[in-house]
Amino acid sequence: MKVRVLVRPKRGILDPQGEAVKRALPALGFGGVETVHIGRLIEMEVESSEEVEGMCRRLLANPSTEEYEWEVVS
Amino acid sequence: MSIQETYASLGLSDSEYDRILELMGRAPNYLELSLFSVMWSEHCGYKNSRPLLRRFPNTGPRVLQGPGENAGVIEVGEGWALAFKMESHNHPSAVEPYEGAATGVGGIIRDVIAMGARPVALLNALRFGPLDDERNRYLFREVVRGIGGYGNAIGVPTVGGEVEFSPAYSGNPLVNAMCVGIIRADEVVRAKAEAGEGNLVVLFGAKTGRDGIHGATFASDELTEESEAKRSNVQVGDPFAGKMLIECSLRLLERDLLVALQDLGAAGIASSASEMAARGEVGIEIDAERVPLREEGMEAWEVVISESQERMLAVVEPEKAEEVLKICGRYELDAAVVGRVTSDGDLRVLDNGDTIGSVPAQYLADAPVYEREVRRPAYLDEVQNFDPDDLLVPEDYNEVLLRMLAHPNLCSRSSVYEQYDSEVGSDTVVRPGADAAVMRIKGTKLGFAVTTDVSGRHCYLDPRGGGAAAVAEAYRNLSCVGAEPVAITDCLNFGSPEKLDGYYGLSEAVDGLVEACEVLGTPVVSGNVSLFNETEQGAIYPTPAVGMVGVFDDVCRHATSGFKREGDMVVHLGDYRPTLAGSDYLEIVHGKVVGRPEAPRLSHEKEYADLVRLLVAEGIVDTAHDVSGGGLAVALAEMSVAGGIGMVVDRVEVEPMLRGRRRDEALFGECGAHFVVAVPEERWEDLQEALAGIPYDQIGRTGGDRFAIPGLLDLTVDDLRAAYDRDLFERHAPEGGHLG
């Protein structure tokens, strides 16, 4: 089955990548951007979804700085 | 929550709360209580260590600034000075190793910037539990990544440090970061909010978020399962913002726009403002609503104690404020006037004009002081009881030497420092892997050398001797590269001072440092204390990490440890009284951490090390190495591997050293105050002349590809290298069994 994991910075935690992009956008003429947060999307083919939670906790996300959610997409 | 639960949750004791009531003459509100909580934590207030720290010598002919400022400063010459400090980030790194280590590096860099110095060198003293444990491997890997991730990106070279592994650090790693900066001696900045009333307080750098709220209190607590749940404390570092902060701060100082400058570390604005106010004997008012925020809905108390990274606080004359804000904007940094200097001595926090907390800064700066009873703990008699005659004697010394060289505590550190940029800035003369890093001061012949040293095991077996030995080892390391040792910074990592063992270790180790600093003439100019390094399994080894800085008049005259030429005479110099008590050999080969190591003979340390330095400075010797962990055999093997040249010890000449000794003691026994140097034959006479009155032996000659001590050892340099060049990040085979 196919699983999709979305990892993003925890609410309120400093996101230097997001900040850098937020500063860069107006420089290219894109106005009105109030916040930018950058996370990542992970797609995996797995035999069962049983271990996905453990994978997220121990490798795919860093629970001290990031939050994650996952779903079976097919 | 009851009042008692509230102050207890902030890490304040009943008697501390009573003292606050007495000082204030009323009940403090939550903000005020938070201020006391952070400022009276060990991390900021040194409440358990202050009386001990007063024992340190802190003056000397080259000392421009001793303890009490953001960093110590020493004079090099030709108007140049060095600012340096070492600081711990142990607890944050235990919880989130990458960011913990990265923000540790960022934090120590800001301390150096606050003195007005440009950071030019970083070092890290690290301790972890053994690598056969997955969690320890994770902490080690991520801490090293974090140091590289921040240091490499901000453009300050990581030039040295140390790493050791012991079960005593399982779950409670030590991450001590040191930074050295250069500055003109007459441009040193002080963090006093003087020049009084009416001056403005400007916060510049990154925006403030809910990072590390109560982090200082957290750092002064033991690590338990519960602290896992305190994970929201984690601060995230941004090295690119850190780089802007360096350049912006130095620009503001160069333009003479600041009255005082202070970095924001533990306890954020609250701590920085109250320290500036207390030092300057003035008051400071902070308008919490003016602080640029990253998050919505932050409470004023959160704003003032947030530990968001990459921020500095400056005192500015009103007419210069506009220019300051403009320059900060040019560096893409947020900046705002967030308060003013007052004359009443209070740290006052306002929120849209309403006073929401007010405490005399002096109260915050005067944390209570606990002097505890120093009583020798029972464990010492037990662990010091050691008789080498109980040890089996190994049969194959080839195997023993290879095993020692391959051990994580003695093998090459290249798998660690290869992840660091050690040359950015183009001032690195001797890179990591040597006895000490050597740096030049651009545009001059001047240079400096820097090293970090301590043996936790030695301090555990004998805290006083171990403390002195740490200073002595640093002194030897700097002398071997040819630098004149000047001063130290230290990071005192200990367990709970509320426990007998912990306080005894702290007090004794400090006395050991004091003794050594006095004899060796290296005062303590800065430092940091990290207590409560305990897990449910117990306390760490007492680990007073010493960072020592030395100077060169002519940095071209330096030495390194690798053999340089075939046919050099190899000379042992200094005391040769090796003992297996507390040695690496005993731990690695016999699985024992016992015995009382030789107490350093400080006057010999000074005499011999000073002589080695002279030999280097006069150009007689370009190859020198101090003998420490692993004893003489390991020291010689290291010199062979570093130079890629073998050596043969002449049996006749080594015989006097073996006489009456166990073979393993002669090869791997440890004691201070000795060195190995190598000279070509044509300088042998000069060397003999210089060594008059000093114990020395010519023990062998370099050359060929064999490393041999006839009758004891016979290996090739390739054998040694294969063992020594171990990748610490490879998944480890468990260590072999012990000899017993």
Image (cartoon, coloured by chain):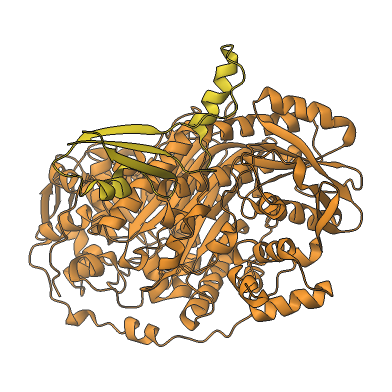
Q: Quadrant of the N terminus of chain B?
A: bottom right
Q: Quadrant of the C terminus of chain B?
A: bottom left
Q: Nearer the viewer, residue A1 or B695?
A: A1
Name which quarter of the figure residue A73 lies in. Answer: top left
Q: In this picture, is B325 found above or below B458?
A: above
Residue B490, percent across and down?
54, 58
What x and y, as percent, mark residue B476?
A: 44, 55
Residue B413, given in percent of the width and then of the height, sits at 31, 46
B29 to B546, vertically: above or below? below
B172 vs B110, left or right, is: left
Apparent side of residue B702 relative to residue B17 in the rendered image (left or right)? left
Q: Is residue B544 rendered to the left or right of residue B287? A: left
How far across and how far down the image is residue B227, in percent? 46, 63
Instruction: Name the residue rendered at 37%, 86% in the picture.
Output: B381
x 85%, y 52%: residue: B354
Q: Residue at x 52, y 36 (%)?
A: B238
Identify the residue at horizontal 60%, vertical 62% (top origin): B43
Q: Is residue B687 left or right of residue B652?
A: right
Depth order, front residue of B92/B621 = B92
Above-or-below relation of B700 to B542: above
> What is the total number of numbered labels drawn onto the structure image?
0
Q: In the figure, the yellow chain has which letter?
A: A
Q: Is residue B198 visible?
A: yes
**Which chain wears orange?**
B
Could you tell me if residue B483 is visible in this image? no
Q: Camera-side residue: B366 or B371?
A: B366
